Amino acid sequence: MATLIREFFSSAEQKFAVVGASTNRSKFGNKVLRWYIDHGYTAVPVNPRETAIESLSCVPNLSSLPGNPSDYHLSIITPPAATKSVLEEAHKNGIQRVWLQPGAESPEVLAYANEAGIKTIADGPCVLVNGIPKEDVKL
């Protein structure tokens, strides 16, 4: 898992999207977004009901990410029932790396990610604990 996490952060582009970002600072969707910001990364919040979160422009879905969506790595903080459709949209947009934050995964979600060839971090690690600050990443 450590290798997958290092690869997740070692992209030359270092573009991240946080699916399930929230305006509520007590929710993990907000805490994960702030982790990226606080550790020097560019992150785009994804939430269909918000226009801005933490002073960042929010997009409603992965197809609306600025530039090429396939350049992004995702942190997903959604209920498992919504996560599968997020992964389907990710696959459709050529996104190849996702981090399913604890609680976003299910056996069905993991099976789909494996089937679609999406490199997935899941089953426990959380970016809040296991993330690598930008200054510690070796490109």
Image (spheres, rainbow, N blue to C red):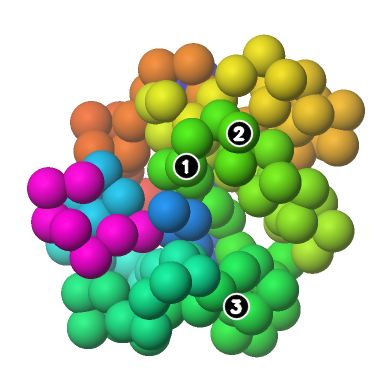
Q: Decide which of tag 1 and tag 3 comes sooner along the chain.
A: 3
Tell me what residue is drawn at x 42 percent, y 25 percent: 103
Q: Is residue 49 above or below residue 113?
A: below
Task: Find numbered disc 1 in the image and state the secondary structure of the residue it sits on.
Answer: loop
Tell me what residue is drawn at x 48 percent, y 56 percent: 19
Query: What's the amino acid at mark 3?
Result: Leu
Q: Decide which of tag 2 and tag 3 comes sooner along the chain.
A: 3
Q: Report which residue position mark 3 lands on.
A: 65
The overriding secondary structure of the stretch rendered in magenta is: loop
The label number, if any, that marks residue 61 in the structure image:
none
Q: Report which residue position mark 1 lands on.
A: 78
Cα–Cα span, label 2 and label 3:
22 Å
Question: Is any atom of residue 93 visible in this view?
Answer: yes
Q: Nearer the viewer, mark 2 or mark 3?
A: 2
Q: Which x, y percent locates residue 15? A: 50, 68
Cα–Cα span, label 1 and label 3:
18 Å
Residue 123 vs residue 11, the one in the foreground: 123
| Magenta stretch, residue numbers | 21-27
Q: Are marks 1 and 3 in contact (CB under 8 Å)?
A: no
Q: Report which residue position mark 2 lands on.
A: 81
Query: What's the amino acid at mark 1?
Result: Thr
